[in-house]
Amino acid sequence: MEQKGDIALIGLAVMGQNLILNMNDNGYTVVACNRTTSKVDEFLQQAAKGTRVIGAHSVEEMISLLKSPRKIMLMVKAGKAVDDTIELLLPHLSPGDCIIDGGNSYFLDTIRRAKSVEGKGMLYIGTGVSGGEEGARRGPSIMPGGSAGAWPLVKDIFKAISAKTPDGSACCEWVGDNGAGHYVKMAHNGVEYGDMQLICEAYQLMKYGVGLDADAMHTIFAQWNTTELDSYLIEITRDILAFKDADGEPLIDKILDTAGQKGTGKWMSVSSLDLGVPVTLIAEAVYARCLSAIKDERVVAATILSGPEEKFSGDTVAFIEDIRKALLASKIISYAQGFMLMREAAKEYGWSLDYGSIAMLWRSGCIIRSVFLEKIKAAFDKNPNLRNLLIDEYFASLIGSCQGSWRRVIAQAVTLGIPVPAFSTALAFYDGYRSERLPANLLQAQRDYFGAHTYERLDKPRGTFFHTNWTGRGGDVSSSTYTA
Ligand code: NBP
């Protein structure tokens, strides 16, 4: 009898091919399919040679080669390609079959697709898959969400192929309904933007503030990786700084300083604005990339705009330790903001998210993997209803112990004219979040003055609104829209 596949995967680019090989290593039979069918043959003759992978050259053939209920994973370009492929599949599927989108889809698209596919009697999963090519091959972090009934169908496969934490747990857990998996993947990518920007600011301070060369910074990052900052991104930064170009000089010094982006950081910032959550650090990280991208303008501006003349003259060793602590404190803020956003999204979209479990999904196999995430898990284990990571005892005390350094570093950066947007916004958020009173009283007065938008009073119960005729010329009628 012809061998039948456990799962099919459409999309034989870098992610799809590596996921198939990973599934094959774990004992699953995968049917491989691709829009351009010549890639199926190439794959079977090359990377998948000698494996039990089965090739399919049409949707019909792929369907006929699958065990029921059918599980079909898409690893195609996010966007229209996903919709097109779903449309192509639907007429061939039976109730109970499951479509899985493993690409970087926008969570609102996933919500829409899940609803539409479920409406036709099939199941739908939108799953984040993180870790790039290497993760896909050796064990990615997997963040699935969608039709709850689909989870038992793919749970064993996904857990088997996923990364494992140091204690052996799979970095793969059901996240929640419809778009929850892709939302959490988006948050992962946003946090990645933040972590990367913070590391870059530490580098900039050491390079242009203290005047350290790449070799010296390599040693510092190696040391930092033995502290609370122990993480994949610190590790690769250490290695990047040691990497030499063909002429023996550090390659890093020759790379053009304009950053690219694919949009997930922007999606997260847009979502934070939509939901009214101050995810300032990740938004700053996105803007920092945008500023880097206008290199030509910066080159001109550098010849026109002046900055301070001061040079760093302090204790280098002490300042480097201050930078490490500023980085750690800012990183705590970034994660606190990321979890604040997920909490609000869960309310908005009706998901029941397990934040400790999410931290452990990211513990291994993905770009933001770090020891730090275990502390986040511990915080949510201690209090699953924790309102904000910052008020957890461990994080409150850690950030408290870093704040002197954090303030010194930002003050020094301002004095030297070195931009540290993510460090600064993190500290501004910290100071704002811990402020019992902010100047929004004045803001409300202004709004009431020019637009009769009303205000609440400290000496009256919340929910009672007042309007003042500030000039004696306005009327007593207030605006009907009160938006604080
Ligand atoms: P790409 O994002 O480069 O997509 C290439 C695949 O999409 C090919 O198989 C291509 O088929 C297929 N495709 C396209 Br393009 N348009 C199609 C259409 N209209 N109908 C059917 N198939 C179509 O591949 P990737 O880099 O492997 O990424 C796959 C997904 O995983 C993306 O959503 C990506 O954002 C996500 N992701 C990527 C990474 C990474 O490190 N690369 C990491 C994590 C997540 P063809 O061969 O016929 O052109």
Image: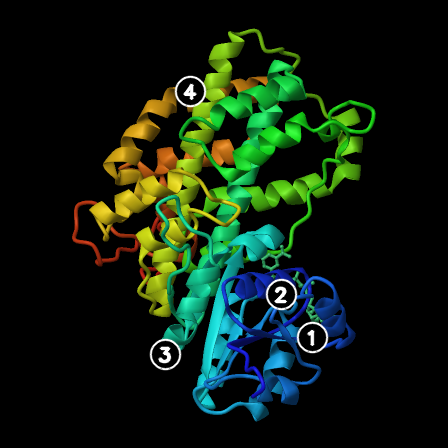
- Which amino acid type is shown beneath numbered disc 4? Ser
- Reading the image, the residue beneath label 4 is 405
- The quadrant holding residue 81 is bottom right
What is the quadrant of the N terminus in the image?
Answer: bottom right
Disc 4: CA contacts within 10 A as few (<14), some (14-19) or many (>=20): many
Disc 1: CA contacts within 10 A as few (<14), some (14-19) or many (>=20): many
- Mark before the other along the chain sequence, 2 or 1: 2
Q: CA distance from mark 4 to mark 2?
A: 45 Å
- Reading the image, the residue beneath label 1 is 34
Disc 3: CA contacts within 10 A as few (<14), some (14-19) or many (>=20): few
**Residue at point 61% right, 17% down?**
216
- Residue 199 location, x and y as percent? 55, 32
User: Which mark is drawn over residue 237?
Assistant: none
Which marked residue is nearer to the observer: mark 1 or mark 4? 1
Total labels drawn:
4
- Reading the image, the residue beneath label 3 is 149
Q: Nearer the viewer, residue 345 or 451?
A: 345
Q: Which element carries disc 2, helix, strand or loop?
A: helix
- Residue 146 location, x and y as percent? 42, 73
**Residue at point 36% right, 52% down?**
169
Q: CA distance from mark 2 to mark 1?
A: 10 Å
**Residue at point 64% right, 89% down?**
60
Q: Which element carries disc 1, helix, strand or loop?
A: loop
User: Which mark is drawn over residue 16?
Assistant: 2
Q: CA distance from mark 1 to mark 4?
A: 53 Å
Label pair 4/3, CB-CB below 8 angstroms: no
* Above or below, comparing residue 90 to residue 49 in the picture: below
